[in-house]
Amino acid sequence: ESIRGAGAGSLKRLQTDYIDLYQIHWPDRYVPMFGGLNYNWKKERPTVPIAEQVAAMKELIDKGKIKYWGLSNETTFGICEMVREADKIGCPRPVSLQNMFCLVQRHFESDQAEACAPSNFNIGLLPWSPLAGGVLTDKYYGPDGKRLEAAPEGSRTALAPGWMSRYRLPRVVSAAEQYCAIAREAKMSFCDLSLRFCLSRYYAASTIIGVTSMEQLNECLDPFEAKAGVPPLSDEIIDKIDRVHEACMDCCLGVENVPLPE
């Protein structure tokens, strides 16, 4: 009912007859979220069955209201269950996965990449937060490449000090400073490096950006234009990025102490 109602509302607001890509924004069930790394069974809650959600998507496709559907913030288990339920009822499989992915969070590259590979479920990744809330841009770093003590006036960190605090952990700052140094050595903006890295991944269909000014929009669009006409990041730059990643792997993620079942 929720999916049907939301779909009808989207069509009305967009003033269109159909939606090209309709995504489930959150899993209805409990999953670790916003930097959480491990599963806490005590947070499980009643949920709408995955089969029921997939059936609703099939209904929207059959009625011509959507062309394709996708997932967001989903786990490998959820991806596999969605595909399994879709296959059971003849529903087209999801085509996209909107998950967090950036230089300081590459968790997708393990089992999720295997599940979504073209040889398996063939689901394209749409990275969200590719700039880690602005942390992977030049505005937070001084001429020496070190993190500024005070957030720039008007920035999201200055306006909302507690917002996305996982990106301001000391280990994240350390990794970001090293990535910033790679960008400056290559004579490109930190934003350009961060977005071009996401676009360099074979599994990334595109990437999601958010801006607050035309200046930011133009800077964020440059990597997309470069993808069509400018050589990709060199093997040397990718290697330097990977060396930092090996030392600071998924540094914005945290581990919760999960009690054992009683």
Image: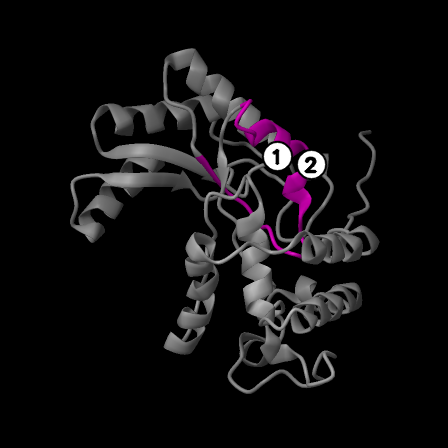
Note whether 223 is above or below 23 in the view shown. below
Residue sitting at 83 percent across and 33 percent down? Answer: 260
Residue 42, image x and y in percent? 71, 37
For residue 149, side relative to residue 22 (left or right): right
Residue range of the region highlighted in magenta in the rendering: 96-120
Q: Is residue 92 left or right of residue 7?
A: right
Tell me if I can see residue 177 in this picture: yes
Front residue (pair 40, 253)? 253
Q: Are marks 1 and 2 in contact (CB under 8 Å)?
A: yes
| Residue at screen point 41% across, 70% down | 217
Asked if the magenta segment contains residue 112, the reply would be yes
Instruction: Identify whether 157 is placed above or below 87.
Output: below
33 part of magenta stretch: no
Could you tell me residue 207's position as x and y percent? 48, 52
Q: What's the amino acid at mark 1?
A: Ala
Q: List the residue tagged with mark 2.
A: 110
User: For the C terminus, which image quadrant?
Assistant: top right
**Mark 2 burial class by Cα count in 10 Å: few <14, some 14-19, many 20+:** few
How far apart marks 1 and 2 lie (CA) works out to 6 Å
Tell me the residue at 55%/40% (across/down): 202
Residue 169: quarter of image:
bottom right
The answer to whether residue 1 of the structure is visible from this angle is no
The residue at which mark 1 appears reads as: 113
Front-most of 46 and 199? Answer: 199
Q: Amino acid at mark 2?
A: Ser
